[in-house]
Amino acid sequence: MNQPIIEIRDLKRCFGKKVVLDGVSLTIPTGGVFGLLGGNGAGKTTVLRHTLGLLAAQSGSVRVFGLDPVADPVRTLGRIGYLSENRELPEWMRIHQLISYSQAFYPNWDPDYAESLRNMFELDPKAYVRALSRGQRARAGLLVALAHRPDLLVLDEPSSGLDPVVRRDILGAIIRTIADEGRTVLFSSHLLDEVERVADRIAILHHGRIQLCVPMDQILSSHRRVRIRLSSAVSRFPTEGIWIHCEGSGHDWSVVAEGEMHDIQTEVSRLQAEILTVEPMNLDDIFVARTAGKPLTAEVRS
Amino acid sequence: MNPSPWNVTRILLADMFRRNWVILIFGFVLAISPPALILGALKAKGALNVDDPAMIVIHVTFTQIMGMCFGVGVLQVAGWPSRLFLLPLSNRAIMLFQMVPATVLVIGQTILSGWILNALFGLNWPTLGNALAFGMVFATFQSFLTLFQKSVLMLPTLGSTLVLEALWVKSRHGPIFSLPTHYWTMVTPVECGLIGTVMAFCYALGMYGITRARCGKEIQTGLIVYLSRAFSNRIGRKAKVFRNGIEAQSWFEWYQKGVVFPIIVAIIVPATAVRWLFTDSRFHDLLETLQVEGWMMSAAAMIGGMILGNMRTSDSSFAMSPFLGTKPLATTSWSRLLLATAFRSLAWGILIWLTVYLLVLGGSELTGENLPKKPFVWWHFPGQILAAWTAMTFGLCLSLSGKLVYPKILGAIYFGWLITALFVRGLAPAWFTDYFTVSTLSGCGIALFILTLWVWGLALRRRMVANSQAIMACLVVASLTAIAGWQLAHEAIPSEGSRIHLFLLVSGLLSLVVFPFAAAPLALASNRAR
């Protein structure tokens, strides 16, 4: 494995009495695209803000490029490009002012690349930020985040406000290009088809805990939806083993299993049941199975 | 729920008062406290003569100050009418909801404050005329806000209307081009009718504004907007090239927030001169007013500092926005940059004030008018600059911390002290009043001194300031304290005890001159990584 670009150890964070992060540990390797998934209020933005040094760890530690982003903001933030969730930009600036202002902070700023991005995003240099639509603000924010060719690009809900064309073609292409250049993209999203398309590795955050942190191909190959028929009717499906989610009643159950096919067959035999169908799952279904309702297994899988 | 407009209005009103009663009470106490304290001090020294003609000027001035302080709170509580546009309310109901309770509150506050001051100090000030007039002014303000919103037309139209109304109110206290000569004791039916007519006109104007705004028809400002855009396009056409992040951030801080204080001064000082034209028009009085304004500049500086320290890009929650928080700038460099911007802002404000002061001084020389009997005391000018610097940087550090709890704590301390002081002054025996004054002033000075020491200690421990800077700060405070001590020793103060508590208070205040050099990096760091 590559040298990790971000290392989070046992991070805890409370806002008042609300526990938002409850012992999060996460290692993100250098290079590639890392997707952070979770429902509303799962703690995605809080994790990202810790990596940017915008929140100080109440307990645990955060290291980015091997440095503490709170103690050393110049050396960490100088190598990070960030697009915030709510697209906060100074309303009074014009686009060309925003570009020249941002350029001053980054020695590696590439003016040609910035200009090509501005053309690609169709941003009028004389336009005021306050006059931009939400989607245009997202593009302006993306331009500023990308033009200094950061080693780490942190995108908080990057698709929010972008139209499908920009989202699919431009954003997807940019993310892949950065990853192909050996740099790292960390992004949070709940648009799972998009994550499935671009991410190399994902982590699912649920109720302030990491539920899963695996490579994308592994998560897709290890989860299956299995329809099984039990020999005797039960009112509650057995929760042990490889099963992570179930629906049904009596004899017929539709369950989500995590494991190899022979593990599933072994478990089904142990239950004295028969397999009716086995279907592959997409990320959307896996996410819902892992986060919706009460999970069958309480333990953290990572 | 019965969804009739009246029922909705009733529920909204109840909700408004339930959520904002603290602001209203705080605004009321804040509005009445300066007059109460000043009149209390005059009464304690036996200098309060209710038959003195100068009391008429004091009455008119205090009524305006109280009305404006409370009016700001009421505007905050009333909010923008646009929040009601999606509710099932008619335009008429929205305007009524917006205008009537707020106007009634302002009228009620003026009458109640007048009664309280009359009862406390036996003033016999009339209340009804000024209360109705202030209601009219407030209704005008609200209707123009509703009609023009953020249009550039608002300033000239509202300004000229308010000037006309102010002149009319002034005419109720004597000739327009002189100092007030008598109280407005009797409100005639004609005056009531005129005020009622203006209020009705304001209501109609506000209704028209709501009708337009509700369907997105902005007021067209034609030539003014064209000129403003042309000017703005001209100055913003070329991109500025910055050498580094510090330079870029300096530009950002100055253009977004630093210019606010000089603009406030540039509006207030000429406005004073215009107002002076409608009183006795003697340079003597204008000079005295400008000297007082030199001290009052501290209040504007504190507001300017709080705006400068607000690190939000769009609103005023004070918490640093991610856009700024992710800039690769060292916290200590950034805080120094902010202090430099505060200094620049202050320098421009003082330059504007000083220019007007010197012009007036020159005018008085040219006209051969005698200067004030009490010439400008030598330490007033540096004192005013230090006071403005202290107020601005204290405000800067408060908002830079990103925590609203600090202004709230300070507000609560002030509130508690004020209530206690009024209570003590009104009810306690003389010896206790003296003891209270000496102990609170001394305590305040000592507390400020300790606060500065603590902040410097913390900043040194976190290596946000160097030892050499701490030594320099000590030298500055010691020098300023020595000068203040020397000056106090030579001032005509009745007893030794008075000198000691004044010395302690002044020393504490002077220690705040160096307070921001340690507090600003601490506040910024806590706001940046919360």
Image (cartoon, rainbow, N blue to C red):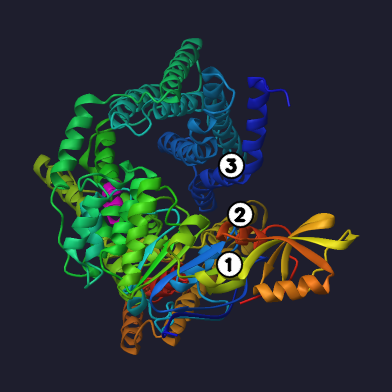
B361 or B72, which is in the foreground? B72
Relative image position of residue A21 (x, y in whole percent): 61, 70
Q: Nearer the viewer, mark 2 or mark 3?
A: 3
Q: At x 30% / y 43%, what residue is drawn?
A: B268
Dot 2 and dot 1 residues touching (CB under 8 Å): no
Relative image position of residue B515 (x, y in whole percent): 40, 73
Picture layout, residue A268 above or below residue A191: below
Q: Provide the secondary structure element on which disc 3 rests.
A: helix
Determine the residue located farthest toward the bottom in the rendered image. Answer: B467
Local packing at callout 1 (Cα closer than 10 Å; few below 14, some 14-19, many 20+) is many
Write down the region rendered in magenta.
B258-265
| Protein chain holding label 3 | B
Picture layout, residue B466 above or below residue B410: below
Kind of residue sitting beneath label 3:
Leu
Q: Provide the secondary structure element on which disc 1 rests.
A: strand
Marks 2 and 3, Cα distance to the nearest angstrom?
25 Å
Picture layout, residue B158 above or below residue B372: above
Q: Is residue B127 visible?
A: no
Name the residue tied to disc 1: A204
Name the residue tied to disc 2: B425
Relative image position of residue B91 (x, y in whole percent): 51, 19
Local packing at callout 2 (Cα closer than 10 Å; few below 14, some 14-19, many 20+) is many
Q: At x 22% / y 59%, what residue is drawn?
A: A114
Q: Earlier in the sequence, mark 2 or mark 3?
A: 3
Which disc, if any, is residue B24? 3
Does B417 lie within the magenta span? no
Local packing at callout 3 (Cα closer than 10 Å; few below 14, some 14-19, many 20+) is many
Kind of residue sitting beneath label 2:
Arg
Kind of residue sitting beneath label 1:
Ile
Marks 3 and 1, Cα distance to the nearest angstrom?
48 Å
